[in-house]
């Protein structure tokens, strides 16, 4: 039974850092912003201030889009039917605009930090 004990000990050694990793990842709030018909859905997202935030931008259109924000100083291409992560913050409370640089007349959004 000594071998069994070593095996379960090893399993725990591998398992524990994995659980810790998940906990760390879960601490960073994330929000999904969908691009559909060259618009952001929802057009407004609210996130907490003073934290790193992961904006998960999912492009449900078949054409590429560029997630862009002058306020947030971010610019990132999202391929058609693809997704990307844009990390922002920690941010002070306020309203930060973003837009789709390839369809700026329709793709407009706001990040509200509270
Ligand atoms: Cu651009």
Image (cartoon, rainbow, N blue to C red):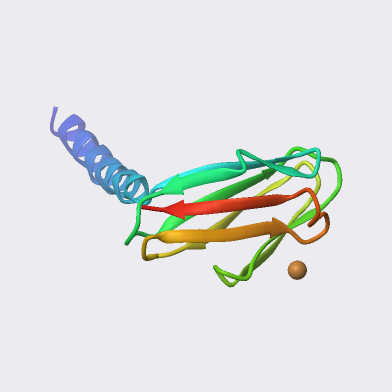
Position of the N terminus by quadrant: top left
* Residue 67, position as x, y percentages in the image: 69, 58
Q: Residue at x 33, y 49 (%)?
A: 21
Q: Residue at x 24, y 43 (%)?
A: 16
Direction from residue 97 to residue 82 in the image, left or right:
right
Number of numbered discs visible in the structure rendering: 0
Q: Residue at x 43, y 55 (%)?
A: 53
**Whether residue 83 is situated above or below residue 11 in the rendered picture:** below
Q: Quadrant of ligand 1?
A: bottom right
* Residue 24, position as x, y percentages in the image: 31, 51
**Whether residue 99 is situated above or below residue 15 in the rendered picture:** below
Direction from residue 101 to residue 33 in the image, left or right:
left
Direction from residue 29 to residue 66 in the image, left or right:
right
Q: Residue at x 35, y 57 (%)?
A: 49
Q: Nearer the viewer, residue 32 or 82?
A: 32
Direction from residue 45 to residue 18 in the image, left or right:
left
The image quarter containing residue 104 is bottom right
Outermost residue to the top: 1
* Residue 81, position as x, y percentages in the image: 77, 41
Q: Nearer the viewer, residue 84 or 75?
A: 75
Q: Nearer the viewer, residue 78 or 98?
A: 98
């Amino acid at each position: 039974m000594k071998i069994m004990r070593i095996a379960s000990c090893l399993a725990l050694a591998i398992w524990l850092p994995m659980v810790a990793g998940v906990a760390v990842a879960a601490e960073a709030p994330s929000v999904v912003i969908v691009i559909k018909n060259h618009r952001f859905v929802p057009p407004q997202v609210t996130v907490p201030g003073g934290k790193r935030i992961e904006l998960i931008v999912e492009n449900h259109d078949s054409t590429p889009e560029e997630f862009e924000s002058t306020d947030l100083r971010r610019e990132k291409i999202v391929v058609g039917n693809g997704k990307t992560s844009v990390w922002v913050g920690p941010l002070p409370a306020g309203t930060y605009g973003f837009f789709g640089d390839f369809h700026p007349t329709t793709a407009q959004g706001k990040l509200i930090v509270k």
